[in-house]
Image (cartoon, rainbow, N blue to C red):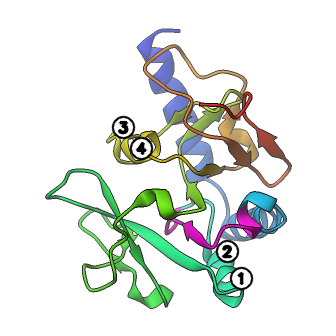
Amino acid sequence: MSSESKVRLYNRILSTRDELAVDDVKRMSDELQHRVMGMEEYRTALRVGLYAAFRNEVRTERLFVEGDKYRKEIYFPAVDEERGGLSYFRVINLEELLPGEEGFRQPTAKQSRLRDLGTLGALIVPGVAFDLSGKRMGFGKGFYDACLKGYGGKRIALAYDFQVVPALPAGSFERLIDWIVTERRVIRCGSCGR
C-alpha cells in the first residue's frame, strides 16, 4: 500500500472514533476494561503503566480504580521535553493528571518518576490502529513507539474493534504489541515473541 493508503486509514479510523457517542464510548470502554481485568497479564502485574484517554480514546479510569483497590502501583506517562519521549509517574489520584500543552492529561513533575520502565509488569497503551501481528499505528510523534521498544514486559493495547485491521499498510511499523483488547475480543498478537 502507498503512503496515501496509510493516511486514508489513519483518517478513516480517527473519523470513526471521533463520531462515537459519549454513551457508546462509556459502554465499550467498560466492557473492554472488564476484559483487561480478567487477563492474567494484568491481574499479576504489581505495577501498571496506563494512559489518560484523550477525546474518544478507550477510557482507563476503571482500570485505575480497580488497580488501586488491589494495591497496584499505577503510573501514567508525561512528555519528557528534556529526554525526548515519555516518562512515567506514579499517580495516586486521577485529579493529579493535568492538561498539557496539547490538551492531553498527564502527571506533573510533582509525582514520583519511575526510574526503570522495566519494573512495570504491564504497559497499557492507546493507538490509532493495530494489526493482528501486533503492529501499531500511533499519532505520528513516536513517543509510545520509543517507549515500547525499550520495554520488555507485557504490552497491552486498548482499542475499539474497528481499530483492528488484518494488516497495516507497508511501512516502518514494528511489532510492538503482545495483546489487543477490544470490546468484543482479546487478541494475542503473533507468537508474542520479540
**Mark 2 sits on what residue?**
63
Per the model, the C-alpha gap separating discs 4 and 1 is 27 Å
Per the model, the C-alpha gap separating discs 2 and 4 is 24 Å
**Mark 4 sits on what residue?**
150
SS for dot 1: helix
Between circles 4 and 3, the one closer to the viewer is 4
SS for dot 2: helix
Three-letter amino acid code at disc 3? Gly
Q: Residue at x 32, y 42 (%)?
A: 141
Query: Magenta stretch containing residue 29, yes or no?
Result: no
Sequence-wise, which precedes: disc 4 or disc 3? 3
Q: Which residues are magenta?
A: 42-55
Three-letter amino acid code at disc 2? Leu
Seen in the image, is 95 located left or right of residue 17? Answer: left
Between circles 4 and 1, the one closer to the viewer is 4
How packed mark 3 is, by other alpha carbons closer than 10 Å (few <14, some 14-19, many 20 or more), is: few
In front here: 38 or 13? Answer: 38
**Mark 3 sits on what residue?**
140
x, y percentage for residue 34?
A: 81, 68
Per the model, the C-alpha gap separating discs 3 and 1 is 31 Å
Cβ–Cβ below 8 Å for labels 2 and 1? yes
**Mark 1 sits on what residue?**
66
SS for dot 4: loop
Magenta residues, dominant SS class: loop
Three-letter amino acid code at disc 1? Glu
Between circles 2 and 4, the one closer to the viewer is 4
Between circles 2 and 3, the one closer to the viewer is 2
Sequence-wise, which precedes: disc 4 or disc 1? 1
SS for dot 3: loop
